[in-house]
Image (spheres, rainbow, N blue to C red):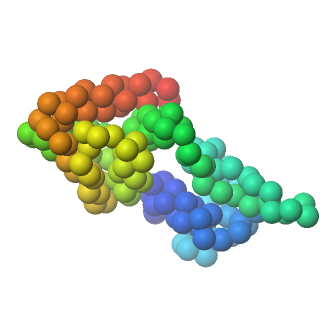
Amino acid sequence: MRSKAERHRAIQEIVSREEIGTQKELVERLKQLGFEVTQATVSRDIAELRLARVSLGKGRHKYALPSMELPEDVYEELKRQFGLFVKDVDRGGNILVVKTAEGHASGIALLMDRLKRDEIVGTLAGEDTILVVARTEEGARALEEEFGELLVAGKMRL
């Protein structure tokens, strides 16, 4: 059985590349990829991923990934993702290691990059681990504290 994380990643890829207008279409597309899902499951996934239904005109719609134009939108989404998928935050010198649920590291690292924070030199994501390189050890300590607070705040929202 494939994991929820894999299904979420597949949904994000599908809606970013295809015009999927209904939950039924998304269920069918996921089944083509080997996911055994119901419409109720897909409905929950759509809510969890915060997909938006956007108009294509002439009564047609499609699902789209949430846009995050404002820094506060990025931060709120990062907090939500931390609550759902981050397991641990650790630090060694000026490097943070963020452990995530399998398949979620790259999406969370992208959000970290979108913060455009001076103290973050860059991120590197694998399947379930993110390396965050901070400019200084002091900056890494501050990020470790902030990410720890995000983890707690995100878990409290669930």
**In the drawing, does residue 90 fall left or right of residue 9?**
left
Which residue extends farthest right?
58
Give the residue drawn at x 26%, y 52%: 122
Picture coordinates of residue 133, whole percent (x, y): 20, 47
Give the residue drawn at x 57%, y 61%: 11
Q: On screen, 62 above or below 136?
A: below
Q: On screen, 127 above or below 131?
A: below
Which residue extends farthest left?
93
Q: On screen, 33 above or below 86?
A: below
Which residue extends farthest bottom?
32
Which of these two is toward me, 124 or 80?
124
Give the residue drawn at x 67%, y 64%: 27
Give the residue drawn at x 55%, y 60%: 12
Can residue 143 be seen? yes
**In the drawing, does residue 79 fall left or right of residue 100?**
right
Picture coordinates of residue 1, whole percent (x, y): 46, 63
| Quarter where residue 34 is shown | bottom right
Picture coordinates of residue 46, whole percent (x, y): 63, 50
Q: How many numbered marks have been drawn onto this rendered protein structure? A: 0
Picture coordinates of residue 73, whole percent (x, y): 53, 37
Which of these two is toward me, 47 or 61?
61
| Quarter where residue 20 is shown | bottom right
| Quarter where residue 106 is shown | bottom left
Which of these two is toward me, 148 or 43?
148
Can residue 108 be seen? no
**In the drawing, does residue 156 fall left or right of residue 62?**
left
**In the drawing, does residue 70 fall left or right of residue 136?**
right
